[in-house]
Amino acid sequence: MQKQNNYAFIDGNNLILGLRNQDWKIDYQKFHRFLKDKYRIMKAFWFVGYISGNEKIYQKLVRAGFALIFKKTVIDRFDKAKGNVDVLLTVKCFEELENFDGMVLVSGDGDFVDLIQSIKRRGKKTKIIVPNGKFFPKLFAPLSKECLFLSWRNIRKKIEYRKNGWGICGGRTTPH
């Protein structure tokens, strides 16, 4: 992605749950820096269902550089909050279409294939960052050359949250 004005559209719930299924967490600041460095992201929209009590997490995301876009949540029959952001993310993408040269979608949800294809037909560059390669949607198969998987070890080590600077193998990764 060579253009200088690219936007990221992040399905926050899909990202976090995809990584949780692999037993790791993302460092928000490292991830934002990764998006800027690798894809020249100028704006990064993080879509999430709003849950009261998560304000500290939302503050961390904003401090890391993400623009939060909230979806109202509802409680399902299992007493879990649901805040499906697919339509909201798609609408925002089209609202911003004239403002970016390329887009990076962060999601493993195959429902976004139509969005990606539509953006490409409009002459925009696209990339897809898939949180969990084990659950790679078959719908993304025709776009697989545009996909990057966060589960790749060389990617994971750049963006993984490490409590107190300790790495996966127990070795210290930050200076004292």
Image: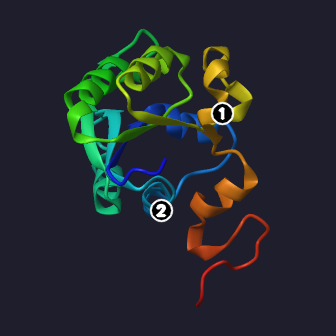
Whether residue 154 is visible, yes or no, is: yes
Q: x%, y% of residue 12?
A: 42, 37
**Residue at screen point 28% across, 55% down:** 62
Graded by Cα atoms within 10 Å as few (under 14), some (14 to 19) or many (20 or more), the crowding at tag 2 reads few
**Residue at screen point 61% across, 62% down:** 158
Whether residue 71 is visible, yes or no, is: no
Residue 133 placement, left or right of 98: right
Mark 1: which secondary structure? helix
**Residue at screen point 67% across, 25% down:** 136
Circle 2: residue type: Asp
139 vs 59, nearest the viewer: 139
Q: Tell which residue pokes out farthest to the top in this image.
A: 77
Mark 2: which secondary structure? helix
Circle 1: residue type: Lys
In the depicted structure, whether residue 94 falls above or below residue 171:
above
Q: Tell which residue pokes out farthest to the front in this image.
A: 123
Find disc 1 in the rendering and name its residue.
145
* CB-based contact (under 8 Å), mark 1 and mark 2: no
As drawn, the label of residue 37 is 2
